[in-house]
């Protein structure tokens, strides 16, 4: 599993519109992409900066999004951004999300799920 983290400063009072555009314009498109798993939006308490973390099944899926959909996503959000987004792609080393993705029906006597595999670490920086 891979994660793409995009961080950027927002113009004042634009967090609500940012989240709305992600939910209404970008997330529906992401859900149709091969390998897309989930998206998390994080914001500083003062709403001056956001980070989105998207989770992808394979690195190739994350990179395909970077070249096909990401430029359009930036264009949709452009009027709300106060700077150039900073993008990094990470290989997920450990996550309880992986266990959800591989979830199975609980069996009688199960006390705890299997521990996640150690996958190693890798990151890629991308400038836009």
Image (cartoon, rainbow, N blue to C red):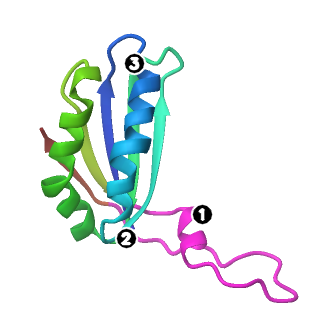
- In the rendered image, the vertical position of residue 12 relative to residue 125, given as above or below: above
Q: In which quarter of the image is the C terminus?
A: top left
**Image quarter of residue 56:** bottom left
Residue 82 in the image, given as x and y percentages of width and height: 25, 18
- 105 left or right of 24? right
- 50 left or right of 72? right
- 108 left or right of 16? right
Q: Distance between the residues labelled 2 and 3?
A: 31 Å
Magenta span: 92-121
Of all residues shown, which one is farthest toward the right?
109
For residue 84, which numbered disc appears in the image? Answer: none
| Callout 1–callout 2 Cβ contact below 8 Å | no
**Looking at the image, which residue is at 47% across and 71% down?**
118
Determine if the magenta segment contains residue 87: no
Residue 68 in the image, given as x and y percentages of width and height: 15, 56
The residue wearing badge 3 is: 14
Of pointers 1 and 2, the one earlier in the residue sequence: 2
**Image quarter of residue 21:** top left
Q: Is residue 91 visible?
A: no
Residue 32 in the image, given as x and y percentages of width and height: 34, 65
User: Which mark's residue is nearer the viewer, 2 or 3?
Assistant: 3
Of all residues shown, which one is farthest toward the front?
24
Q: What is the crowding at mark 1: few (fewer than 14 residues within 10 Å), some, or many (at least 20)? A: few
- In the rendered image, the vertical position of residue 66 relative to residue 35, given as above or below: above
- In the rendered image, the vertical position of residue 59 relative to residue 17, given as above or below: below
The residue wearing badge 1 is: 96
Q: How far apart are marks 1 and 2 (CA)?
A: 14 Å
Q: What is the crowding at mark 2: few (fewer than 14 residues within 10 Å), some, or many (at least 20)? A: some
State the residue in front, 17 or 127.
Answer: 17
The residue wearing badge 2 is: 57
């Amino acid at each position: 599993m891979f994660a793409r983290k995009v961080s950027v400063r927002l113009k004042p009072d634009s967090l609500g519109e940012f989240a709305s555009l992600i939910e209404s314009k970008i997330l529906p498109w992401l859900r149709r992409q091969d390998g897309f798993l989930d998206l998390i939006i994080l914001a500083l308490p003062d709403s001056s900066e956001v980070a989105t973390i998207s989770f992808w099944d394979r690195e190739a899926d994350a990179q395909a999004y970077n070249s096909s959909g990401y430029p359009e996503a930036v264009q949709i959000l452009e009027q709300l951004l106060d700077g150039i987004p900073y993008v990094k792609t990470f290989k997920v080393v450990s996550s309880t999300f992986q266990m959800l993705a591989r979830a199975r029906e609980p069996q009688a006597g199960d006390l705890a799920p299997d521990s996640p595999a150690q996958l190693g670490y890798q990151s890629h920086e991308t400038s836009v």
